[in-house]
Amino acid sequence: MGPSAEHSEKTWQQTKSENTRTAVLEAAVDCFYELGYANTTTEKISRRAGVSRGAMLHHFPTRFDLIKAAVEHLNEQRLATFAEEESRIHLGADNSRIEEGIDAYWRQLNTPVFVVFHELKVAARTDKELEKVLTPVLKDFDQAWYEAVTQIFPDLALSEAFARTNYLTQYLLEGMAAAKMIDGPKVPEKKMLAWLKRELRRSYQDVLGTVKRPDASTGG
């Protein structure tokens, strides 16, 4: 076998391995959503992924490894979706579009990805293995999230209110999304979203209209 054929074979094997790993992680998230964390087993995940148990164990030798990787995969999905949608909304904007940004974030919280994220956090209260996985991963996620919002909202990041309003937005919207899972239409989302938008616009008066986004002049 020549060098090029060997390289091609290696690349194919790597691609196959990556696809298998991704399929297992996506199957794990699907099982968490449809069955709940407590009812999800490695057997159910491998069956959902369409891979053998041996193939799954090759990538994730222990349940701990699988859960950790699944949580990291979930967080990567949340960050990627947030960055993509918010960046699209702000393309070419002179100032951060607060109202549109809040609406986009709220839509993201009303998806299976956030439902699973919330369920895992609740389950970790009484599951020490899950708590051990979540604690460092969530710490990394919080840091990555703050870096993301700082990059996506560069003008707002210059405000003295930036850290406080980020906590306000995250805790209010995630709390409402969690309540909506149980209370459904009883959650006054329109009223609270309208109030939050007014509060953020008031809080950012020190930069809105006076500080332009760095990419405003280039349109991207």
Image: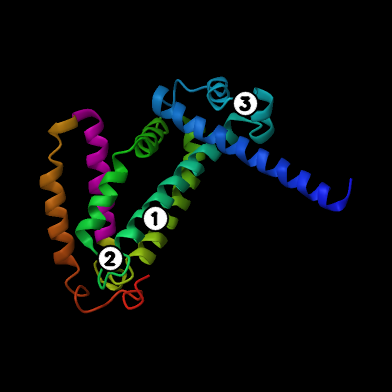
State how far apart marks 3 and 2 are (Cα).
46 Å
Please state which amino acid type lies under the numbered disc 3. Answer: Val
| Contact flag, marks 1 and 3 (Cβ < 8 Å) | no
The residue depicted at 25 percent of the width and 42 percent of the height is: 175
Rendered location of residue 137, percent (x, y): 49, 46
Q: Which residue is mark 2?
A: 162
Q: Which is in the foreground here, disc 3 or disc 2? A: 3
Dominant secondary structure of the magenta stretch?
Answer: helix
Q: How is the image coloured?
A: rainbow
Rendered location of residue 66, percent (x, y): 57, 34
The range drawn in magenta is 165-183
State how far apart marks 1 and 3 are (Cα).
31 Å
Q: Which residue is mark 3?
A: 51
Res 168 seen here = no
Extreme residue toward the right, this view: 1
Between residues 30 and 173, which one lies in front from this camera angle?
30
Q: Which residue is mark 1?
A: 84
* Disc on the earlier residue, 3 or 2: 3
Rendered location of residue 165, percent (x, y): 24, 60
* Disc on the earlier residue, 1 or 2: 1
The residue depicted at 50 percent of the width and 42 percent of the height is: 73
